[in-house]
Image (spheres, grey):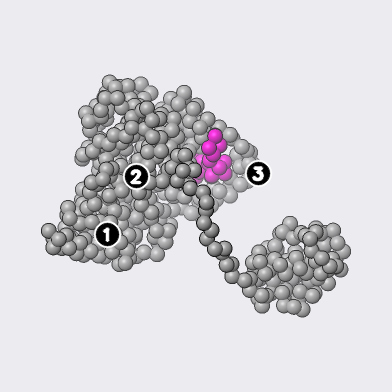
Amino acid sequence: MAIPVETFFLSPETQGTLQARIQQMIASGILSGRFHRGEKLPSTRKLASHLGVSRITVTLAYTELLANDYLTSHGRSGYFVSENAPVPPLYDPPAIRSDRIDWGKAIANSVSGGDTPKKPVDWQAYKYPFVYGQADPELFDHANWRLCALRALGQKDFTPLTTDYYDTDDPLLIEFIARHTLPRRGISARPEEILITMGAQNALWIAAHLLLDPQRRAVIEDPCYHAQRDILRHTRCALTTVGVDSEGLPPGQIPDGTDVVFVTPSHQSPTNATMPLSRREDLLARTAEIDALIVEDDYEFEMSFLKAPSPALKSLDQDGRVIYIGSFSKSLFPGLRLGYLVGSEDFIREARILRASILRHPPGHIQRTTAYFLSLGHYDAQMRRMSGVLHDRRKAMDAAIRQHRLQISGRGTFGGSSYWMRAEDDVDMGQAARDLREAGVLIEPGAPFFMGPDRPRNFYRLAYSSIPTGRIADGIATLAQVVSGQNETGSKRR
């Protein structure tokens, strides 16, 4: 493809004849790096028409650039930037200036201070990536996603592609969620009770900022999803942590005066505990007793390859006090950033207004592409394929962990994609994670999931959604060796 003719314009500040100015325009484009070697220039006729000059003027400019080896001619194919064209000069960034602004004072509401761990962007380059929440290209149905994206770009879908929905969403996607996705969780909702979000994290942010302020109290699980904890800190609310056990959050430990409880009952993050039906009923009873709301993050319910997942907490709610959060980002791919909120119409109405004031709505093309992928059955087919692969990887994980006598602290009862692990008390898994990187092994230290200054450092998370089955055994063996070395170091310190 040729360089777009709209890229070319004659600056009124340049001097000389029209031919010289055109030469300077093209040479500057090459020297600045805007035009790359091998790229095709517009035809002399098209560029002359665009610039409002005669064709012979453009032809003479091209000929001069050809003689100076800025351009090359390929017969009737046209003119191209020469492979011998001067290399653009290396960019030399300016020296770091000293700001005279005290940003510590200038920023009224600081959002830093969290300790959310950062995953390496090149995680695929590691041989043993036990990393959570990343897309495995072998499991994603790229071909059908591409076809759905192309369909969403068609003339028929011009309106959803280009329209500013403002505070509404793609009706096709909303309809699928209402008729197919939510009923699988036992939830019945009207379109007015559903809001599309930029992933589950955006949904958590909206819920937190609508329900909390410095005069209100929130309860979160400990350990918990660290990004959720940081979001709640931004609201300046009073924050109480409740330690989870093998059945999730104990309702009896929720204190009086609590306004909102944030919980992951179906697949606790990060311990993978599943809250039984009796405890879910107790949680609803406790929150009704103190008139608190519940925000339910129902992630990974699709990864149910061992047995059917428990009904969502929202499905048991008779008072409208449960706000439900779902996401397609984990089951499709994290870069999709598409989730949804389900709640009473009054709450969703306010959530729409808040979302519109921040980002208006998720891109229409992404919503329509996802709607096609779901409605044409590609999503369900991918989930079946992914469940089979994850089942095989889990069996390989079980065998390797058992062989090397590593301690599992929590794993999903119906499936999932990770294990919550525990080393000996003296082992610092943060240091172990750094040592493991040198050996090509990526894990997630557990300390950031806990609250308080004395958070335990001997927990870690192992995910198997991104590592091929054949590499699991060797990766676990390397992990066991490093953890054993850390344990010996800790014993010597004692």
What amino acid type should be assigned to the residue bearing mark 3? Answer: Gln
Instruction: Check if mark 1's residue and mark 3's residue have beta carbons within 8 Å.
Output: no
Q: Which residue is mark 1?
A: 431
Dot 2: element: helix
Chain part drawn in magenta:
357-376
In three-dimensional space, the C-alpha distance between marks 1 and 3, rounded to whole angstroms, equals 55 Å
* Residue 8 spot, x, y in % from top left: 74, 60
In three-dimensional space, the C-alpha distance between marks 2 and 1, rounded to whole angstroms, equals 19 Å
Location of the C terminus by quadrant is bottom left
Tell me the tag on residue 226: 2
Report the number of discs.
3
Position above or below: 234 against 424:
above
Residue located 30% across and 67% down the image: 439
Position above or below: 185 against 381:
above
Nearest to the eye among marks 1 and 3: give it. Answer: 1
What amino acid type should be assigned to the residue bearing mark 2? Answer: His
Position above or below: 348 against 303:
above
Splitting the image into 4 quarters, where does residue 474 fall?
A: bottom left
Label 1 packing within 10 angstroms: few (<14), some (14-19), many (20+): few
Looking at the image, can residue 366 be seen? Answer: yes
Residue 371 lies within the magenta run: yes
What amino acid type should be assigned to the residue bearing mark 1? Answer: Gln
Label 2 packing within 10 angstroms: few (<14), some (14-19), many (20+): many
**Looking at this view, is 244 or 72 the one in front?**
244
Q: Which residue is mark 3?
A: 155
* Residue 288 spot, x, y in % from top left: 30, 22
Position above or below: 234 against 53:
above
Splitting the image into 4 quarters, where does residue 169 fall?
A: top right
